[in-house]
Image: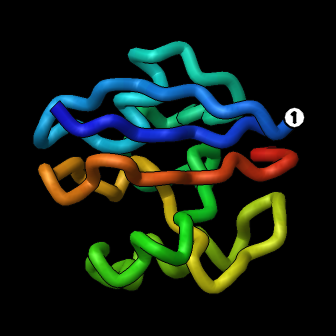
Amino acid sequence: MPTIHYILKDGTTREVDARIGASVMETAIRGNVRGIDAECGGCCSCATCHVYVDDAFADLLPPPDDMESALLDAVAAERRPHSRLSCQLSVTAAFDGLRVRIPETQV
């Protein structure tokens, strides 16, 4: 089972075991990770699950599609090169050790 490392706003890290096929957002919600609001429940329509993916894992991810990219243009926190919506990141075995930073704000 892959482990996702969520770096919280205060700099602490929460580690949550993820199920293959679940999203990084669903894993955060199941693990009660604060800062990922997920208001739309993972439908890629609100951008309140924005995260910054660690550089070491960025190349493992498919690029954002047009819908995700448009939502990332309107996130509340700064959009960075490795900004992603965690609802669009489906966990694979390669995600073991994935580190994502939660932005200061989602809304």
Task: Tell me the amino acid under the disc marked 1.
Answer: Asp
Q: Nearer the viewer, residue 107 or 100?
A: 100
Q: Nearer the viewer, residue 95 or 63?
A: 95
The quadrant in which residue 3 appears is top left
Residue 59 higher or lower than 50, as above or below:
below
Dot 1 crowding, Cα within 10 Å, few <14, some 14–19, many 20+: few
93 on left or right of 14: left
On the image, the x and y values in percent for residue 54 come to: 55, 66
What residue appears at the point 62 percent right and 63 percent down from the top-left corner? 52
70 on left or right of 19: right
Residue 57 higher or lower than 36, as above or below:
below
Q: Nearer the viewer, residue 95 or 43?
A: 95
What residue appears at the point 36 percent right and 31 percent down from the top-left corner? 26
76 on left or right of 80: right
Identify the image quadrant of the N terminus. top left
Residue 101 higher or lower than 28, as above or below:
below
On the image, the x and y values in percent for residue 102 come to: 69, 47
On the image, the x and y values in percent for residue 37 come to: 63, 31
Question: What's the image's color scheme?
Answer: rainbow
- Check disc 1 and report its element: helix, strand or loop: loop
Identify the image quadrant of the C terminus. top right
What residue appears at the point 46 percent right and 74 percent down from the top-left corner? 56
Q: Which residue is tagged 1? A: 10
Figure disc tally: 1
On the image, the x and y values in percent for residue 66 come to: 39, 84
Q: Nearer the viewer, residue 46 or 78?
A: 78
